Image (cartoon, rainbow, N blue to C red):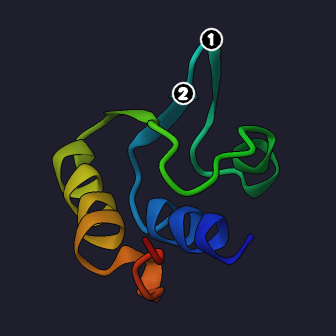
Amino acid sequence: MRPAMQFVDVANRFDSDLAVSSGETSVDGKSIMQISMLAATVGTKLKIKAEGHDADELIEALRDLVEEKMFDEPPPKK
């Protein structure tokens, strides 16, 4: 649940709207309750769509959290 909270915390720093989808399910990326409904685990492919004046910055901040900082978690064991 901690990575989902980190994701939502970053998203809420921006004014733009954020939609996150997995398969046919799309949720508000700024709501921890809705993000948790995706039940995403390590390796789950998610699509994100931001709309608003700071959408590019929002996407970049989330990319940094997920791809660079990896939610401040150690990489998964192989």
Residue 8 position, x and y percent, is 58, 62
Q: Amino acid at mark 2?
A: Ser
Apparent side of residue 63 relative to residue 3 in the rendered image (left or right): left
**20 or 55: nearer the eye?**
20
Hey, which quadrant is residue 72 in on the image?
Answer: bottom left
Hey, which quadrant is residue 58 in on the image?
Answer: bottom left
Apparent side of residue 43 relative to residue 59 in the rendered image (left or right): right
Residue at point 54% right, 27% down? Answer: 21
Per the image, the residue denoted by label 2 is 21
Q: Amino acid at mark 1?
A: Glu
Per the image, the residue denoted by label 1 is 24
Answer whether labels 2 and 1 touch (C-beta < 8 Å).
Answer: yes
Taking 24 as reference, is 71 above or below it?
below
Hey, which quadrant is residue 65 in on the image?
Answer: bottom left
Residue at the limit of the structure toward the front, as seen here: 78
Residue 41 is tagged as none
Residue at point 45% right, 78% down? Answer: 71
